[in-house]
Structure formats: structure tokens, C-alpha cells
Image (cartoon, rainbow, N blue to C red):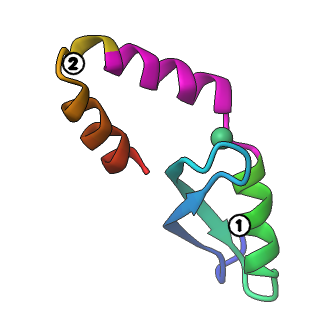
């Protein structure tokens, strides 16, 4: 491992489903971070995310709570 790379948790937004999620990025110096983050964001598992949201939705009876949960998930 190069000494200059550091693990860092970054908050990304999926370009496809617009879900916010956190990844641990290993970014070395000299690497184009914006490009790297964009690539990581593009790797988001949208299907899995949608499934999880659907499962969470089932536990809520109140639609108002669901929209609040959705807002928090963003
Ligand atoms: Zn996604």
C-alpha cells in the first residue's frame, strides 16, 4: 500500500436513484477525486437499495412517517 493513500468515508449520491450512501474511499494523492467518487457513485446497487426501502416502508403504517424516512434516507 502506498503511504499517501488514506481511507476516508465519503458521502456520495447515486446518479441513477439519487440515494445518498457512504463509501470508504481509498484515494491516493494524484488521483482525480471527483472522477473516482463519480465512479464509486455509479457502482451503487440501486436494486438492493430499492428493496431495502420497500422493506422499510412495510414497517410504517403512517404514510407521513414513510415520507419522513425517505427524506432521511436521501
Ligand atoms: Zn442507486
Pick out the residue farthest to the front.
63
The residue depicted at 77 percent of the width and 68 percent of the height is 36
Residue 20 vs 66, above or below: the answer is below
Foreground residue among 19 and 40? 19
Residue 58: image location, x then y, percent: 31, 11
Residue 74 picture location, percent across and down? 43, 51
Q: Where does the magenta region start and end?
A: 43-57
Mark 2 or 1: in front is 2
Residue under numbered circle 2: 60
Identify the residue at horizontal 76%, vertical 64% (top origin): 38
Is the residue at mark 2 in contact range of ligand 1, meaning its CB lies under 8 Å from it? no
Task: Return the mark for residue 37.
Answer: 1
> Is 63 located above or below residue 61 in the figure?
below
Q: Residue 50: percent from the left, percent from the top?
A: 55, 25
Q: Nearer the viewer, residue 18 or 44?
A: 18
Task: Give how far across and how far down residue 34 sits, in percent.
Answer: 75, 78
Magenta part mainly helix, strand or loop? helix
C-alpha separation, residue under disc 2 versus residue under disc 1? 33 Å
Give SS at disc 2.
loop
Residue 17 drawn in magenta: no
Amino acid at each position: 500500500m502506498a503511504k499517501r493513500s488514506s481511507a476516508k468515508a465519503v458521502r456520495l449520491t447515486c446518479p441513477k436513484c439519487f440515494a445518498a450512501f457512504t463509501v470508504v474511499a481509498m484515494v491516493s494523492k494524484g488521483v482525480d477525486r471527483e472522477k473516482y467518487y463519480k465512479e464509486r457513485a455509479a457502482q451503487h446497487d440501486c436494486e438492493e437499495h430499492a428493496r431495502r426501502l420497500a422493506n422499510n416502508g412495510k414497517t410504517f403504517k403512517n404514510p407521513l412517517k414513510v415520507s419522513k424516512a425517505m427524506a432521511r434516507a436521501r
